[in-house]
């Protein structure tokens, strides 16, 4: 029986049409700025986000880290949300590479008032609060989406205090589908934006950071410094372009499958799911007994792969390689293993 892999939407494999696009890509040396397919991808993403320019990089971690480094000096402070990806899942790079500290607000989303309360003035005895970073959708928040009004409130508060704003929009494509808005609307008011191609969109590699032309020039230097300069990168960019043009609308299917999974688990014993929090393709499953580690191991033995999000919390992520039958099978397996644990 085939595996149902719900560990992440990063486990997707290129479709036959995407593989054909990769094989037919027109390429050049991108370190010299000569790869035409990379240029087309950067222009397309900048247009979607409403920014002047964009830069193709190998990973979402690099996109976030070079953006935040470009905005700050060593010793600065960044305001982030609870369990923000740039803090929790990027190997301590903010401290190790950018030399900045973080102030974590208590929620996965936050308000302009919380930004104002957290701000530290530019005094010699405190860290300069320089950046407000927003994550949309929020990975550890179960795919939480921000409302446009909340984003505007936060960016306006930050700018009024002289700060800059960064949007970790790795799954902005999901947020746009879920909130019936556009990526451009969700990116409005941010000084920089990162987006990922290798999660829900299903490309094998790649992210982009976007902003003004001057900002992207600074990021370009940092990309080289961090080891992200690639040569005939058009092979990868072609996959990203295909994903943007052919896989964005179908994210609604992933959202529907996540909802199906959550609803199938809603009446199961020893597990609980907050249905109201299932807005996109991420489902957080809380256990009433046993451990996430034990349940994940039991499900793996039955051919269902899941991720841990805490000692008694499991994360399941739907994607283009999992259909409705797959999530129903996963729900049945999770319920049976949780009951037996």
Image (cartoon, rainbow, N blue to C red):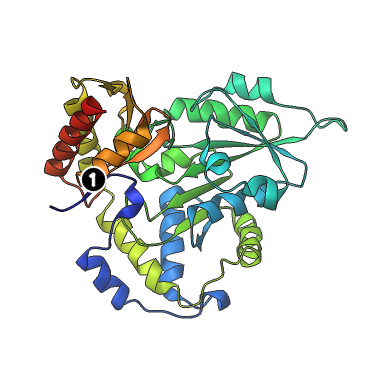
Q: Is residue 154 above or below residue 35?
A: above
Pointer 1 local density, CA inside 10 Å: few below 14, some 14–19, many at least 20: few
Image point 76% across, 47% down: which residue? 73
Quarter of the rendering containing residue 306: top left
Residue topped by disc 1: 301
In this rendered view, identify the residue nearer to me: 52 or 143. 143
Q: Circle 1 sits in a helix, a strand or a loop, which is it? A: helix
Where's residue 121, x and y in %? 78, 28
Q: Which residue sits at x=41%, y=73%?
A: 234
Image mark count = 1
Determine whether 276 is above or below 34 in the image: above
Foreground residue among 5 and 312: 312
Q: Is residue 145 left or right of residue 75?
A: left
Pinpoint residue 207: horizontal percent, then vertical percent. Answer: 46, 57
Q: Is residue 47 above or below residue 101?
A: below
Q: Is residue 118 shown left or right of residue 204?
A: right
Outermost residue to the front:
341
Position of 103 relative to 296 (above/below): above
Residue sticking out furthest to the right: 124
């Amino acid at each position: 029986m085939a595996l149902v892999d719900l560990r992440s939407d990063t486990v997707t494999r290129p479709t036959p049409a995407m593989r054909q696009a990769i094989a037919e890509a027109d390429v050049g040396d991108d370190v010299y700025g000569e790869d035409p397919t990379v240029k087309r991808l950067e222009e397309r993403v900048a247009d979607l986000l409403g920014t002047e320019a964009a830069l193709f990089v190998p990973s979402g971690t690099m996109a976030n880290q070079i953006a935040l480094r470009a905005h700050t000096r060593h010793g600065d402070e960044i305001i982030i949300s609870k369990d923000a990806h740039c803090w929790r899942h990027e190997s301590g790079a903010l401290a190790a590479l950018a030399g900045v500290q973080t102030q974590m607000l208590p929620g996965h989303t936050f308000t302009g008032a919380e930004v104002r309360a957290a701000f530290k003035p530019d005094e010699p005895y405190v860290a300069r609060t320089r950046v407000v970073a927003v994550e949309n959708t929020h990975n550890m928040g179960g795919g939480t989406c921000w409302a446009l009004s909340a984003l505007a409130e936060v960016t306006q508060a930050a700018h009024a205090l002289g700060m800059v704003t960064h949007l970790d929009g790795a799954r902005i494509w999901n947020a746009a589908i879920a909130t019936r808005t556009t990526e451009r609307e969700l990116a409005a008011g941010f000084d920089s934006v990162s987006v990922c191609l290798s999660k829900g969109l299903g490309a094998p590699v790649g992210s982009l950071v976007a902003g003004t032309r001057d900002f992207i020039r600074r990021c370009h230097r940092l990309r080289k410094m961090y080891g992200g300069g690639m040569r005939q990168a058009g092979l990868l960019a072609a996959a990203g372009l295909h994903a943007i043009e052919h896989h964005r609308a179908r994210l609604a299917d992933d959202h529907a499958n996540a909802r199906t999974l959550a609803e199938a688990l809603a009446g199961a014993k020893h597990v609980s799911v907050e249905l109201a929090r299932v807005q996109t393709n991420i489902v957080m499953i809380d256990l009433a007994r046993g451990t996430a580690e034990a349940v994940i191991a039991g499900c793996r033995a039955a051919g269902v792969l899941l991720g841990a999000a805490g000692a008694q919390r499991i994360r399941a992520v739907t994607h283009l390689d999992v259909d409705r039958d797959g999530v129903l099978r996963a729900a049945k397996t999770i319920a049976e293993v949780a009951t037996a644990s």
